Amino acid sequence: MSLSFDTAEELLIEYEKIGVAMYDESLNDFSIRYNKLFKTWRQTVEALDAFGAEARMHLKPFLTHPDLQLRMNAAYDVEDIDPQASLAVFREIAASGKLPQAANAKLALSRRDPTYKG
């Protein structure tokens, strides 16, 4: 499956839709649809990268989005450009206790933050 969008803005809209849909599916025990959405999410990021090195900066507003999965996705995808903001989101979601995102955030922290005690 290849994604084709004319503008980075169109990709950002798609990115948001995918993150929200992933949250809904994560509540259904990681169904086949979640796995497809995961693959599409990664393709969306690859397509966004084609717009240049600065394109991922446009994902930073998603770090404060009310949807937990979208925030997690954004934290992963801005990690290279803003590691502190990324870690802050992982810490916040881990502390929330809301599963399955909290468990994923704890795992992300354990791999990225040597001071994290889980």
Image (cartoon, rainbow, N blue to C red):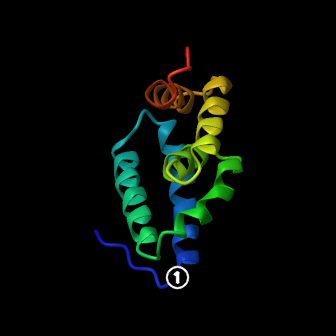
Numbered disc total: 1
Spot occupied by residue 96 in the image (x, y as percentages of width and height) = 67, 26
Residue type beneath disc 1: Thr
Q: Residue at x 45, y 80 (%)?
A: 5
Q: Furthest-left residue in view?
A: 1
Going 43% across and 68% down the picture, which residue do you hit?
A: 49
Residue 66 percent coordinates (x, y): 71, 47
Residue at the farthest top position = 117
Task: Pick whichever, 89 or 33, lies toward us.
Answer: 89
Instruction: Determine whether, in the image, residue 21 is placed left or right of residue 43.
Output: right
Residue depicted at 46% across the width and 76% down the height: 51
* Location of mark 1 (residue): 7
Q: Is residue 6 above or below residue 106?
A: below
Please determine whether, in this image, residue 103 is positioned above or below residue 89: above
* Residue at position x 34%, y 54% in the image: 39
Numbered disc 1: secondary structure: loop
Q: Position of residue 98 (x, y in %)?
A: 62, 27
Q: Quadrant of residue 30?
A: top left
- Dot 1, how many residues are within 10 Å of its Cα: few (below 14), some (14-19), or many (20+)? few
Residue 33 on image: x %, y % = 38, 49
In which quadrant of the rendered view does residue 93 lie? top right
Q: Quadrant of the C terminus?
A: top right
Q: Quadrant of residue 3?
A: bottom left
Residue closest to the eye, 18 or 54: 54
Residue 9 falls left or right of residue 43: right
Picture quarter with the N terminus? bottom left
Instruction: Looking at this view, name the residue that lies furthest to the bottom.
Output: 6
